[in-house]
Image (spheres, rainbow, N blue to C red):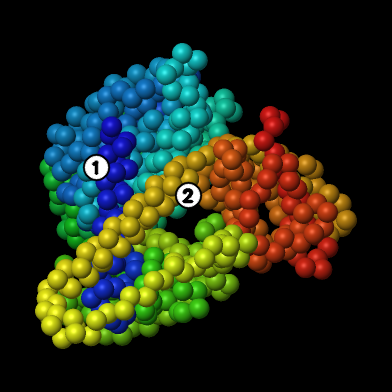
Amino acid sequence: MQQYCVRHNRLLCYLSVVVFILVLLIISPTQTNASAISVNPGSGIDAVLVIDTSGSMRFADPERIALEAATLFMGMMETRNSRIAIVPFSGSLHSVMPLTPIDDPNVRDDIRRSVSRFQYHGFTDIGLGLRAAAEMLLEDPIETNTPVILLFTDGQIELSPQAERSEEESFVDTWWAVDNVGSFTPIYTIGLNFDGSINTEFLEYIAHRTSATSHVIEDPSLLPLVFNEIFASHMRTSIDVVQEFIADGQYTNVPINIDSHFVAEANIIMLSSQPLENVQLFTPLGEEVVFDGDLYTLTSANRYSIVKIINPMAGEWLLRVRGVPEDNITINLIYNYTIDIAFSVSQPAMTGMLFDPDTPLTVNAILVSQMPQSQTQLLAEEATAYLHAYDMDGNHLSVIEMDLDGSIFTVNFSPQPPQDVRIQIHVSHPSFEVTTSTATVPFDIQEVDPNLVEEPDYDEDPQPPYDPVVEDPLEDETEEPEDDSDNRSIVLIIILVIVAILLIMVAIVLLRSMKDRRMIFTGYLELRALLSNGKYTSLEAPDLHTFAGRISLAEFIKVSLGARAERILEAQIPLSGVYIQPTKVNNRPRLLLTTNGNCHISDSDGFAITQHKFVWNRDEQLVFSLVDGETQIEITYRIDEK
């Protein structure tokens, strides 16, 4: 019932947008500029930690470092406006903690104690944990908070033979979570590859689909550093390694230089293999800090300690650390600023959800702070803003310096060649460096396949039989004039009927599209490349069944083959513009292929395929090449078991 409600509410949201657009079309005779994408800075974080507590973790993480590393992430979070949720999973969910504010130090301590008591047992149902995390964010959002999911696991989806759920259902739930929150929530994945059983490609694909990163390690002692790096990545800041040293049982003085007046929070992270014996902090004025849990917080665990400073004064602070003799200690510094960026992407006369590739985008950005506008304006005049564009595979396409118009940074931008892109804004100032989150900009670059357009049936009479009726002119003279209000009512009824029909059609299309997006692939692809030296690469047969939705062939090859993909891609065929997605024909699984036309496609007999969208049938081989090129990639869609 809960799953139905989520889908139902999302459908109502779509229908509301459709009604709004229809009303605009009726009452507005002209088109205006539409700001289709707006990215505003968040005041806090909504973090959901999805933690694998299956039985194999007893061997992969005997010292339970993963649980400490998870609380390390909480310790680095902004505390005044942020919330955290914990979703421990094995073959089922247990001890789930909903999104909870962490502004109270006692609450944070309770969360740490709760996580430390988790028990490792059972199987591994990743989809169950991810779906629970996604539903939390959908059901209890805070508009000003930035959502993030961290998935930690040591294996892959594996369920008991007696379980009520199948592994396929777990995969479906995984892609449901990615499809429903992945556009606005990065899902960082952390894999502990203790025994080599982890599905690396699966974790990388989840992270890639949601504009996040994936981290796979073999040594659990590295987990605190991994969570440290993820926090810095999500906050779009860098980690400064202040100092590394070997403890000798005495205090070591570590200068901490905070050279900006615009720091909102400074996090001093001390990583060690054993608990630190003591930590002291002194302000630039030489005064020793009292850790009060408010402006100054000290959090300690077996493998890390964190000092958090709220609104620190600029200058050189002094950290004094005493550790266990011979222990290796690393001091890192991460901070975020009181300055942030909001930006928008618009296009003249935009009427739909996709941008026109033939018209430049207008990207505007503005600095956001709590200072008076005049001071923010001065900061903008001293700063430089850049637009960074990436393709959907994460490759850097271009960086463009923006112009300052008043207090607004602005630039016109057109990706070349036309393609969907991800963009973000970076502002550099002598006292701060800030970067926005990434926004996806979709373009209407698909062409309609004329073979898919139904021709009208001309066998039937297009006009109904017509019986002329001769009217008596005398009746016209005596007829009562019609009531205008009746005519208006009839027109209104006709409009409402048309709107109702359109809404029903849109609902059907949306329901089908949502169903299609949740579909996972069936089968695998056999592929090899003919290189410029006249030799074929080894035949590869990567599985499709762990993927879902729409994916480019280039992305599929990279994710599924890993390092082996480089050999295939030496053919230099532009497969990034060729997309596949699962579909069904007569209830049989097939692939729907869409291409932007940048590469030549032919069948195994050498006949060119000119359609931009067509069904790829089972056991059908397609050859991808450049016109008059020497290299090619041959791919066959298979459904039989390998």
Q: Residue at x 76, y 62 (%)?
A: 608
Numbered label attached to residue 139: 1
Q: Nearer the viewer, residue 128 or 40?
A: 128
Residue 606 image position (x, y, % from top left): 82, 58
Q: Residues within 10 Å of mark 2 (few under 14, many from 20)?
A: some
Q: Residue at x 80, y 66 (%)?
A: 629
Q: Is residue 119 above or below residue 368?
A: above
Q: CA distance from mark 2 to mark 1?
A: 22 Å
Marked residue nearer the N-terminal end (2 or 1) = 1
Q: Which residue is mark 2?
A: 209
Res. 230 visible in picture: no
Q: Nearer the viewer, residue 366 or 277?
A: 366
Residue 25 image position (x, y, % from top left): 29, 73
Q: Is residue 585 above or below residue 257?
A: above
Residue 416 image position (x, y, % from top left): 56, 74
Numbered label attached to residue 568: none
Q: Residues within 10 Å of mark 1 (few under 14, many from 20)?
A: few
